[in-house]
Amino acid sequence: MPSSNVNLHKFLDRAADFGVEEARCLVEEAKILWPTLSLDAPNVLALWKGLRGSKESILPYKRLSAFFALGSKRLNARAAEWKQEDILPTIVHGIIADIAIVLAHDSEPTSSSPELTPSMWAELFMSLTRIGEELVDYNNRHMAAIKDANGPQAMGDTLEVIAATFARRSDVDSCKMWMDQIARYMYVAMNSKNEELGKQLEKIVGVLKTLELNAQ
């Protein structure tokens, strides 16, 4: 706790003198430390009286903001009761106990994921291998289908060469041939890309097969 928060220190000191003025100053200190906290002096004073009377209750500083938040809410809900100050220690004891339960629950570690056994790793790599092999097979069949649809005929090296070849022709047959050459150019470009993709997939499948054997 910052040393300048004199009244927060006093609040936690059951033997200190703590009255209305200290409660008001504590509210101002709390506004700086916890801007979103709604707190008033009467509730602060009532909580201090309850804390002083609840000898068995321990309130660490790290739980002070939660204590003020829940304490104010509970005092407001039970305003008719705590005017009789002898009930304040019971109320404060319940507040501190409830905060401890909530914070303990929030701090519980989440259950970790089950550890994978060698057989589980092998099954995982087997599944990934099967998926990879299916992708390789699909890629090969796809390239073969495109090649079968377009044929092995020679063609211009670039789109510019193709365009220059048919630029001076205006007949329909030449236009058809031009479009056919464009389609073949696109087929070669697409298959070149797919062929490289297939090679990379085959490498991945090979690695997965090795991992599968090692995991068994």
Image (spheres, rainbow, N blue to C red):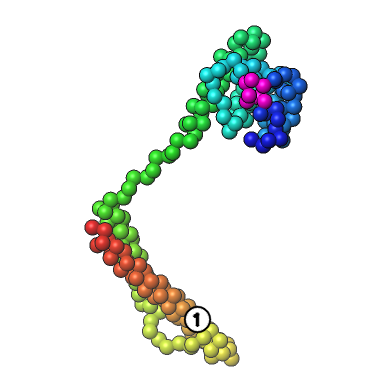
Query: What is the quadrant of residue 197 in the picture?
Result: bottom left
Question: What percent of the width, then of the height, locates residue 13?
Answer: 63, 24
Query: What is the quadrant of residue 135 in the picture?
Result: bottom left
Q: Crowding near pointer 1: few (<14 within 10 Å), some, many (20+)? A: some
Question: What percent of the width, then of the height, locates residue 101?
Answer: 49, 27
Is residue 39 highlighted in magenta? no
Q: Which residues are magenta?
A: 10-16
Label 1 sits on a secondary structure element that is: helix
* Rendered residue at 64%/35% (across/down): 1
Is residue 13 highlighted in magenta? yes
* Rendered residue at 67%/10% (across/down): 83
Q: Is residue 68 visible?
A: yes
Q: Which residue is mark 1?
A: 182
Question: What percent of the width, then of the height, locates residue 90?
Answer: 56, 14
Quarter containing the C terminus: bottom left
* Rendered residue at 76%/21% (across/down): 21
Question: What percent of the width, then of the height, locates residue 67?
Answer: 60, 26
Q: Which of the pair 112/212 is nearer the observer?
A: 112
* Rendered residue at 66%/13% (across/down): 79
Q: Which of the pair 97/53 is nearer the observer?
A: 53
Query: What is the quadrant of residue 61 in the picture?
Result: top right
Q: Amino acid at mark 1?
A: Ile
Q: Which of the pair 4/158 is nearer the observer?
A: 4
Count of marks overlaid on the render: 1
Position of 23 relative to 147 (above/below): above
